[in-house]
Image (tube, helix red, strand yellow):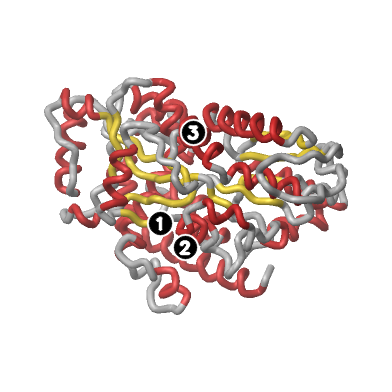
Amino acid sequence: MKKWLFALVVVMMSVTVLTACGGNNNAQSGNTNNQGTDSTEKIKLEFLSLKQEQASQAAFKEIIKRFESANTNITVDLQSMNADQLKTTLRARAASDEMPDLVTWMKEIDPEYLLDLKGESYLSNLNAESIEAANALYNDEVYAMPIDNGYIGFYYNKTVLADNNLEVPTTLTEMKQVAEALKAKGIPAFATGSKDLSVAYMPLIALFSETVFGRNVNWSAERDAGDVSIATDESWKLAFDLHKDYVYGYSDTNASFNIGYDDANAMLAQGKAAFYGNGSWALEPIRQVGPDADIGLMAFPISDNPEESKLLVFPDTSLSIMKDSKNADAAKKFLEFVASQEAGEIWSENAKVSSTVNGVNVDYDPIAADINQYISSGQFTPYGDRVLRSVFTDKLWEDFSKYMLDRTDWDTLAKDLDAAWDRAKEVEASGQ
């Protein structure tokens, strides 16, 4: 795995680094049960979170409030930021040897900076399959504690379809017919754009999860063994073609570079587009715009066989403790509370996602029924970009839009992606 933190430490040591107040207290000792502690030692846990959505922040704040009321000597300082900000902050903090105590897990964080949670008793409160999937990148360690199961699929506005006498498409032929019918009426079939490339990137993840891993769960292992390649596998090309020809091709291409994340959420909620490819995190902002909008969730039909349509369902939000935390015991106590049914219900009700805590079943939104249907029928895959090496996904993110916008051809892109796959494998093997 790419050790980007380690590689930048030497560079960062040579410049002036601004550091935030970190774990500046001695480690807490004593038991780590969920009944609170009588210790008078004041401990401050610094928690860097990737969850910027209002509902997710509110959920964390409520969880922290209840935790602090039971552990009066511990306070939790929640700091929300985006992925780039978190990477930059951790690089600087590694250089100054002032790492935070808790973070929302990212696969780009090298394991040498994370605390192995294997054997912690509170993990038994969580769905074992979710824990295994969240730590699929590692050997036998547990660095990430998943607190919810997310998804990436295609939201659809039922009212838009009904008003235009259209049915929810279950095959690729039907999707073509629906998209053409909407186009004839001047309605973008898909809400997407290029102002914020994540709006376009998310549906591509859903698509290659279906076309590649939905058809062959062993594809990565076979690629490492040299038995398959992106250049020769039609499943990868299919994902990129569906993305270019449908998700982008039937969107408002004239306004593409003026449409960002908030705009796309609003388009779907307000019925200005029929479909929108994104993840579980988009549900809350969609509901903010259209609380009563009649929204469903579906997997994109990748062929004329409806059974090939599989929803990407995976552990989403996970928490990690930094190995150099000066307050590791207190941080474990916090994770123990997060893994409780009380905290699980708070998170699920507010963030509108399914909890990994055993026994927590919150009917957080009507689309929960759609998700459960895919899961119960076995029409889902847990393999998306999070089980791929960072060097490869960095290249994927860098180049995917070139194909979408006809700035490169498939042979060139596939060759570059295969080269990136090989580099990623070499980097992991060398321990760089």
The x and y percentages for residue 363 are 37, 34
Which mark is in front, 1 or 3?
3
Instruction: Determine whether 261 is above or below 374 in the image.
Output: above
Q: Secondary structure at mark 1?
A: loop
For the residue pair 274 and 377, the one nearer the viewer reads as 377
Is residue 19 visible from the viewing direction of this image? no
Q: Does label 1 or label 3 sit earlier along the sequence? A: 3
Q: Secondary structure at mark 2?
A: helix
Residue drawn at x 55%, y 55% as measured from the top left: 394
Q: Are marks 1 and 3 in contact (CB under 8 Å)?
A: no
Determine the CA span between mark 1 and mark 2: 22 Å
In space, the residues marked 1 and 3 are separated at their CA atoms by: 20 Å
What's the amino acid at mark 3? Ala
How far across and how far down the image is residue 320, in percent?
65, 51
Q: Pointer 1: residues within 10 angstroms few (<14), some, or many (20+)?
A: many
Looking at the rendered structure, the kind of residue marked 1 is: Pro
Residue position for label 3: 351
**Image quadrant where residue 4 sits:** bottom right
Q: Residues within 10 Å of mark 3 (few under 14, many from 20)?
A: many
Q: Is residue 163 left or right of residue 397?
A: left
Q: Which mark is residue 103?
A: none
Q: Residues within 10 Å of mark 2 (few under 14, many from 20)?
A: many
Residue lying at 69% horizontally and 34% vertically, measured from the top left: 70
Q: Depth check: give the residue in front, 294 or 393.
A: 294
Number of marks in picture: 3
Q: Which residue is mark 1?
A: 382
Residue tagged 2: 417
Mark 1 and mark 2 residues within 8 Å of each other at the beta carbon:
no
| Helix, strand or loop under label 3 | helix
